[in-house]
């Protein structure tokens, strides 16, 4: 199964990626996490990516495509995968399409729709665990103990790009650069649209339906 998750930042793709991956029996990857991992290891790619991420802009296509393609080509991922956050531009979608043409193409595209006002509320209050990436929300789903992850006890932090100014910029870039990719998939693949503003339980029920 080769599955692509699409939707604006904060629409819940990341939360659902590992659920979908275990359902499909494949690995998932988030392009944003690959960049953050490079940043944590202080690689040249990580330092370059940070200059774009801090401004809410997309990292240039050539480096993003190379990074994700190397992940896809790893022996463990060749047969199938869940991609979260890639492709985000038409050039990335074309590169992926070329790469997958001999493997039968993408099997399913799942699009999470959430209204913009809700996304801004979700992202600007979001806090994450440094260790296990579990998401919390300062107001809607606070941790039991301040600053501490309920699941693993790790430290909670706010992403540098989750401030309101950067969040609005990220949403604008999504509309400009990624809406055309969604339109392209609507025309060329099997796309399933999920109402990502529902309760998590209902989102999972919709996903089960979509994956069946
Ligand atoms: P995310 O964790 O998916 O919200 O991504 C965080 C940031 O990483 C984005 O705002 C971009 O700067 C960068 N990024 C992640 N995926 C991509 C991509 N497919 N193309 C370009 N930039 C990306």
Image (tube, rainbow, N blue to C red):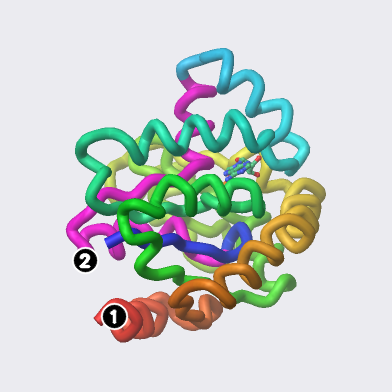
Q: Which residue is mark 1?
A: 208
Coordinates of residue 124 in the picture (x, y in percent): 67, 55
Coordinates of residue 93 in the picture (x, y in percent): 56, 53
Q: Residue at coordinates 66% horizontally, 66% vertically from top-left?
A: 119
Q: Residue at coordinates 80% horizontally, 51% vertically from top-left?
A: 169
Q: Which residue is mark 2?
A: 23
Q: Where on the picture, by quarter, is residue 178?
A: bottom right
Is 35 situated left or right of 72 in this image? right
Front in this rendered view, residue 59 or 155: 59
Above or below for 50 versus 211: above
Q: Where on the picture, by quarter, is residue 113?
A: bottom right
Q: Where on the picture, by quarter, is residue 211?
A: bottom left
Q: Are marks 2 and 1 in contact (CB under 8 Å)?
A: yes
* Picture quarter with the C terminus: bottom left
**Residue at mark 2: C-beta within 8 A of ligand 1:** no
Q: Residue at coordinates 59% horizontally, 47% vertically from top-left?
A: 92
Of labels 2 and 1, earlier in sequence is: 2
Read off the magenta span: 11-40
């Amino acid at each position: 199964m080769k599955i692509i998750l699409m939707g604006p930042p904060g629409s819940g793709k990341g939360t659902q990626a590992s659920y979908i991956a275990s359902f499909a029996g494949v690995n998932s990857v988030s392009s944003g996490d690959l960049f953050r991992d490079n940043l944590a290891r202080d690689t040249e790619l990580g330092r370059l990516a940070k200059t774009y991420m801090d401004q809410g802009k997309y990292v240039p296509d050539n480096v993003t495509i190379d990074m994700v393609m190397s992940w896809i080509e790893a022996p463990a991922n060749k047969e199938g995968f869940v991609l979260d956050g890639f492709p985000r531009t038409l050039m990335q979608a074309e590169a992926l399409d070329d790469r997958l043409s001999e493997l039968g193409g993408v099997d399913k595209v799942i699009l999470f729709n959430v209204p913009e006002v809700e996304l801004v509320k979700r992202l600007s209050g979001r806090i994450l665990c440094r260790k296990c990436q579990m998401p919390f929300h300062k107001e809607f789903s606070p941790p039991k103990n301040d600053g501490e992850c309920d699941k693993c006890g790790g430290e909670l932090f706010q992403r540098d790009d989750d401030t309101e100014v950067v969040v609005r910029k990220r949403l604008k870039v999504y509309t400009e650069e990624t809406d055309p990719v969604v339109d392209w998939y609507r025309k060329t693949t099997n796309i399933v649209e999920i109402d990502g503003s529902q309760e998590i339980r209902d989102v999972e029920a919709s996903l089960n339906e979509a994956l069946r």
